[in-house]
Image: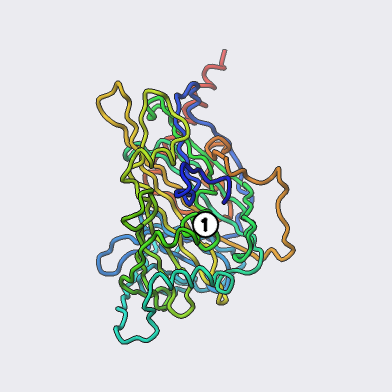
Amino acid sequence: MSTSIHTFTKKTSVTLLLLLFAWIACTVNVFAFQQEENTSNDFNQYRGEVMDEASKKPLVFASLAVEGTNISTITNTEGSFLLKIPKSMNTGTVIVSFLGYKSQSIELSELKPNNNKIALTILVTELSGVNVNVPKDAGALVRETLARKGDNYFEDPTLMTAFYRETIKKRRKNVSLSEAVVNIYKSPYNSLRSDAVELYKARKSTDYSKLDTVALKLQGGPFNTLYVDIMKYPEYIFAPEYLSDYKFTFSRSTRINDKLIYVVKFEQRETIAEPLYAGELFIDVENKTLTSAIYSLNIIDKDKAAKLFVRRKPANVNVWPTEVAYRVDYREKGGKWYYGYSNVLMEFKVNWKNKLFNSVYSMTAEMAITDWEKNLDGKLPKNRERLKKSIILSDEAIGFSDPDFWGEYNIIEPEKSIESAIKKIQRQLRRSKSNGSSASKP
């Protein structure tokens, strides 16, 4: 078992590397900035939103991929997307898909630069009681799916480009935002070698005035989302010795990209005292492939849960999680599947012993693969260039800059609240520059 996993008992050694830092902030350097010129304009941008055709509600984490390429992106929590395509690509088809909905194919020529409205229809298929292909044992299906990762997932070393974002909110207000473009040196799914991550570009903002003098920092950065890749890292949730601690049952079925999908529910058995996980696994019927998973950690015992996540805190503060949830989605190309997107949500209560009310903070981390190529020579970054699993991204990032900071890289479109926070930061930057110019005059 990897020493990077934070544990407090043997039973919970499957817990992902998700750690909360809490301490008194001694120095307050509210904002850092860096201007960087865009290095390329050789791409077209397409913005819009994906929604449910009937209700018009936004579809969160819907996938958009350019057919025949490795270019893709994903919608944010408001259903909005931003897709960047090289100008050299004059024609192409964008496949828009979402869990439980009928996929839609759209020609690039039909997309506008802005305000594209894409509506998907629900597609649900119930499992037939006479279907001989339906396994009788849900647990056996999960075991077979885990055992077939060498057959169904990438078997070559792969170099992936990914966009990573982590946010900290106090109730509904953004307190800290960090973003990064990273290179992931993905080893084959049947290999025991861990993936290596290299930081390409990053930026941040932190407003300590909203933190009650407590600075919350997430240790692990992109590794938090990377380790949600269940098929690459099954030991973090479904280690062989822990599978018997779960109860697996069949739920509804659905379709993804016209593939019939089993939905398997899982939860820890009543006899297991330590906190494990509960959720749903979406498994392709034909190939026994995990296509998605949505699950959460049992945090009923808040003291045990706190020990999993709180690394350091002031003596007069109690901190405990009230929600810990995960999601991972896989994509398919050429009959092989690969990690495409994951997110982690952690909500905490911070209780000062001398204050009447609790503070509620939420920490969200998400990462989307936006491009990839085979890394056939197996080249890896030098050790000094690799991100450490103990990284705190908000300490490494350099600050917010102009809108073209990411250049040609696909990113997850910011939410309106994040856009507002960025605009506020930019206004403060202009004001500080103006004040600095005035002060320098004789």
Residue drawn 31% across and 87% down? Answer: 130
In this rendering, does residue 332 appear at all?
A: yes
Relative to 337, 268 lies left or right: left
Residue drawn 55% across and 61% down? Answer: 232
The vertical placement of 48 against 145, above or below, is above
Relative to 175, 160 lies left or right: right
The vertical placement of 375 against 9, above or below, is below
Residue 398 x, y percent position in the rendering: 57, 36
Residue drawn 44% across and 62% down? Answer: 243
Image quadrant assignment for residue 101: bottom left
User: Which image quadrant: the C terminus?
Assistant: top right
The vertical placement of 416 against 174, above or below, is below
Secondary structure beneath label 1? helix
Label 1 environment density (alpha carbons within 10 Å; few <14, some 14–19, many ≥20): some
- Report the front residue among 82 and 125: 125
- Report the front residue among 350 and 269: 269
The amino acid at mark 1 is: Glu
Residue 231 x, y percent position in the rendering: 52, 63
Residue 203 x, y percent position in the rendering: 54, 41
Residue drawn 50% across and 43% down? Answer: 6
Q: What residue did someone put label 1 on?
A: 235
Relative to 235, 257 lies left or right: left
Relative to 308, 185 lies left or right: right
